[in-house]
Image: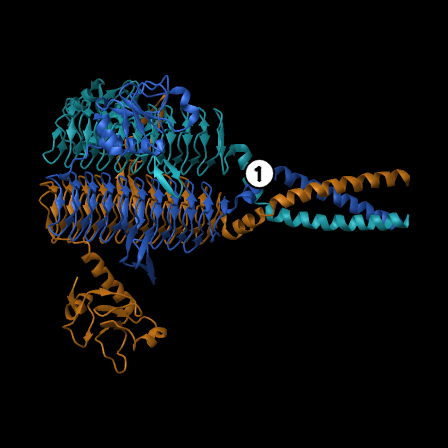
Chain colours: A cyan, B blue, C orange
Amino acid sequence: MRIRLTDLAERLGVPLHGDGSIEITGVAGIREAQPGELTFLGHPKYEVFLASTRASAIIMTGLPPGRTVPILESPHPYLTFLQALKLFAEDRLGIVPGIHPTAVVSASATLGDGVSIGPHVVVGDQSHLGDRVVLMAGAFVGGDVSVGAESLVYPNAVIREGTRIGQRVIIHSGAVIGDDGFGFTRDGETIRKIPQIGNVEIGDDVEIGANSTIDRATTGTTRIGRGTRIDNLVMVAHNVEIGENSILCAQVGISGSAKVGRDVTLAGQVGLVGHIDVGDRVRVGAQGGVTKSIPADTEVSGYPALPHGQARRIYASMRHLPDMIRLVRELARRLDALEAKRGEGGEQG
Amino acid sequence: MRIRLTDLAERLGVPLHGDGSIEITGVAGIREAQPGELTFLGHPKYEVFLASTRASAIIMTGLPPGRTVPILESPHPYLTFLQALKLFAEDRLGIVPGIHPTAVVSASATLGDGVSIGPHVVVGDQSHLGDRVVLMAGAFVGGDVSVGAESLVYPNAVIREGTRIGQRVIIHSGAVIGDDGFGFTRDGETIRKIPQIGNVEIGDDVEIGANSTIDRATTGTTRIGRGTRIDNLVMVAHNVEIGENSILCAQVGISGSAKVGRDVTLAGQVGLVGHIDVGDRVRVGAQGGVTKSIPADTEVSGYPALPHGQARRIYASMRHLPDMIRLVRELARRLDALEAKRGEGGEQG
Amino acid sequence: MRIRLTDLAERLGVPLHGDGSIEITGVAGIREAQPGELTFLGHPKYEVFLASTRASAIIMTGLPPGRTVPILESPHPYLTFLQALKLFAEDRLGIVPGIHPTAVVSASATLGDGVSIGPHVVVGDQSHLGDRVVLMAGAFVGGDVSVGAESLVYPNAVIREGTRIGQRVIIHSGAVIGDDGFGFTRDGETIRKIPQIGNVEIGDDVEIGANSTIDRATTGTTRIGRGTRIDNLVMVAHNVEIGENSILCAQVGISGSAKVGRDVTLAGQVGLVGHIDVGDRVRVGAQGGVTKSIPADTEVSGYPALPHGQARRIYASMRHLPDMIRLVRELARRLDALEAKRGEGGEQG
């Protein structure tokens, strides 16, 4: 992408001081930036680099004395920089508004303004895409799905029938939203599937990682709260409810009907059994196995997960275990001997 | 879906008592059901709700005294209810018999009656689809594949060449069946791939979860027994054999050439090393790490997996470990002191 | 595939002794081979089967006395056999050179000789495919991607914009290369995404398993070294660097910015925390949780991962823990008693 600085300032919504005719081709840190790139000054300790940076424009609060390059003035330079990064990243996706001729969009689907539907996409009956929704190549959207404005679905992601997706949601490639929950009932020798007729609801500003799976509810709804971020290869089972602004790292697994609060952090490969309640702001350490409910504001780790301090002491103690067992056996022998002597002494006495 | 009760009774194969002209639009529990919905009475304790339910029809055994709504009579009301659920769930998939014009089906493929092949599906040379097989959008079926009657393949699933799939099998989105096993041989400095020329066979009534992967055998066949249910993000490696009616929960990993019996349950995130034998009806607790063969009818858990009772005692004991280590050190000091005194005593004696 | 032995010898680059007109239809071990199949003699202990094998041709070093079937002479019979296996395995993929009419290939993409682009494939702007690259059905290649010669991308894999892929790389179905890293910054109550503008580079001869995900770097590059083999459902986070010829088994997870050396083996379900350094030739046992850097040539296992011998002793000791705790409590009681008596004895003395 090449964009004139005037236009970039306008898209970022910040005032420009200086020559707006130069073209910006990328963004980078203040020390790494090359001519043609935009950078930012986010912390006073980087002010020393103002003189030496090769950047063609700087986002900062206020204006530097004796400046030589154009300034984009922002009260939050880092956030404005993130916005600029986003523009350049999205540009590289090559998104073109409109419906690609190879896409198959139901006549009963309704589309907002400026949607982009890529090659080989499918959109089912009665589904609705909000304004500026992007469905990249090979994405599948089943019937009766709603996708909120400015959401972005990457190639080959699958959104099954009945799913509700908020605004500005990002769904990465290969993610599957709304596949059947894993529900069965034994009928003598055979196992019968319990049809899963609920759905999935995903709040605004959620991100779902590549190849993650969010199962539809048996009945009712599996819910992902607004602002929650889910990494790759995560499993969220049927009827799970996750609060707002929680973070689920890669390969986490949450079993059916578990409730997870808001601002929770589950580190990589954590597993939760079903039907438990994990309170707000809980943190679970990597590979932790959570086997029962956890009150709010608790940090746990290990298998089975225990309060983090306790778990640390236990795992540290384990290193001493082989020596300790040897010592205990030795103590037992010495105590035997002492008791025997004492017995002899007693008999002698 | 709107279906007249007469037609619904016929599709469910049960006798109808009452007005067959009403239209049913959904199914629900006896307390939740709304007008237009079908419910069921599966247990006498719910009989109290017969009078108050708002459902428009009820599946039950026998007829209630003074009934006001039509009854579908069934010796197994819950199973009939599951059938009805299945009808409504499948209806929401929007499956249309026939071959979508964007699908690419080999001229040498053979198709049974009533198959449904969705947009952008590919079916390879010499493959066979049984009657009423459904391949949803973007599904890939390689060459020389056989898919049994009434199997359902969800969007963007991949079935590689040579795979054999039974009847009524369900394969969820993003699942990959028959990808290469992970086999290499070291040749001095370099690693060489061992081409994987075996295949995968999947029995009748199996379900494979979203984004799970079932590797083809190096030579021979990776087998999933009839009725086995596999959840999402599960890995089954090359040459594994799994018996009938086993249940593999999400994110389970089974290494190469392991044999898993029938009616086995592997809870979430369980891992099995390769070349072991897990007997019939074995149960492995969540996150368990199975490092050797397990006899039939055993329940194990933990890492490394041990009989469940033993594992529980060990994990319960671990909580006492830090205190225990302090106590042992104290005992050692006290014993030292006692022995020293005893020594003094001996010298004095 | 049916191939005349003369032609097969030529493709394998080895001399043929005997009748080149026979047709070969498959490959198998010396005891299993049927008429029409090619086998090999890789070790003298199998020489006894030379007389009885039903194979129609044999790959071996030198010529047997009194041979009756044609011989393909090779200094490395097993490697030549692997090559033959590869030919037959690839043949079953049904790869056809050329661009399928349903594929959507950017006019600005550049294609080498003999590429094969399957149905519903997408290739983005400015991307380059080397000679004989194969993109199977439904594969997505974003803009500004480079794929080296003879690389093979299986159905429905996704390669996002900016990725660099070496020669002879194999990417299995559902794998996602170059999806966004998982990077956020807290801004008061809300979590903001840090756009991920780096890329992924994959060396020659790498294999990436089905449904694995390799995240693009935040800035800079996530790197997979030449010859490294990655199994299914593996997660490699942003800015990770992996050396050459390493092996990552299924469901491994590597957190952001971790560095993994060459010839490393990570067994199934291993997890690595971020920002650590795992040295060359390190081996981590299945389900191991690596929480800090590991020097080269070390074998570790368990959670938290410890040197393998130590971990084994600890896990073996754990089995004695419940008994040990009982014993320690008994010892404490006996010591109390002994001290009490000693006290009495002292008073008596």
Neighbours of disc 1 within 10 Å: few (<14), some (14-19), many (20+): some
Asked which quadrant contains residue B158, the reply is top left
Q: Position of residue B38 (x, y in %)?
A: 29, 25
> Which chain is mark 1 on?
B
Pick the residue in front: C293 or C255: C255
* Residue B201, above or below A286: below
Is residue C90 among what the camera can see? yes
The quadrant of the picture occupied by the N terminus of chain C is: bottom left
Q: Position of residue B44 (x, y in %)?
A: 43, 26
- For numbered disc 1, what is the local secondary structure? helix
Pick the residue in front: B44 or C316: B44
Which amino acid, by three-letter code, is at mark 1?
Ala
Total marks placed:
1
Q: Position of residue B57 (x, y in %)?
A: 29, 23
Pick the residue in front: B240 or C60: B240
Is residue A2 among what the camera can see? no
Q: Which residue bears the numbered disc 1?
A: B316
Pick the residue in front: B211 or A319: B211
Most extreme residue toward the bottom is C66
The quadrant of the picture occupied by the C terminus of chain C is: top right
Q: Position of residue C79 (x, y in %)?
A: 28, 65
